Amino acid sequence: MIKKQGALAFALLALTACSSNLQLPAESTSSTVVGKLDKTLYLRGDFTLWDAEPQYRMEETQPGIYITKAKFMSPGKVYEFKIADEQWSEGYNCGYQTEGQLTLGQPLIADCNTVYNYFSFKPSKKGWYEIRLDYRNPRVPKVVIVKS
């Protein structure tokens, strides 16, 4: 009788351990996190008088990547901007985290809870530029600018 109870307890312990081991990998394999914004964001800057204008609406082009275009017509001029919703809401007011000067093709980490930290960009040529917000990792959003 004691052997049966011991064997039953061992089997129950083994099954419990197996079932908890089966659940852990399923939870830990979800390493790919893609942030999804639930508000519309705009490129807002000195060239828009800091307004949220429809032509500068950020569009999601792939999961977690938001893009808009701007035409910068004054080479050498410093353009200042942020990416924010219409109300400048907390969590949707993205400026730089530690450095604000954007260089073509070089992403900078954004802080979407900032009041003042606006990005700046000085184009060397006039033309269209694409501004991207990479929100795939919401804890470390990034902004990059590329020539269109």
Image (tube, rainbow, N blue to C red):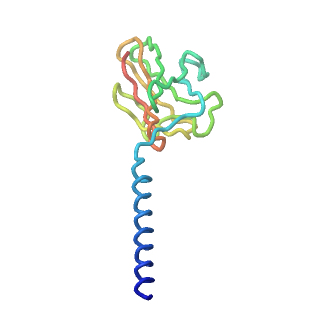
* Apparent side of residue 116 relative to residue 147 in the rendered image (left or right): right
Q: Is residue 78 above or below residue 34?
A: above
* Apparent side of residue 115 relative to residue 33 in the rendered image (left or right): right
The C terminus sits in image quarter: top left
Percent of width and height locating residue 94: 52, 34
Percent of width and height locating residue 37: 55, 34
Q: Is residue 6 above or below residue 81?
A: below
Which residue is at the front of the view, 91 or 95? 91
Total marks shown come to 0
Which residue is drawn at the image coordinates 36% and 13% (left, top)?
Answer: 125
Percent of width and height locating residue 31: 40, 47
Which residue is at the front of the view, 35 or 78? 35
* Residue sitting at the far front: 1
Q: Name the quadrant containing residue 54.
A: top right
Q: Is residue 6 above or below residue 138?
A: below
* Residue sitting at the far bottom: 2
* Apparent side of residue 121 relative to residue 41 in the rendered image (left or right): left
Which residue is drawn at the image coordinates 56% and 27% (left, top)?
Answer: 41
Q: Name the quadrant containing residue 102.
A: top left
* Residue sitting at the far right: 87
The N terminus sits in image quarter: bottom left
Percent of width and height locating residue 110: 46, 37
Q: Is residue 77 above or below residue 37?
A: above
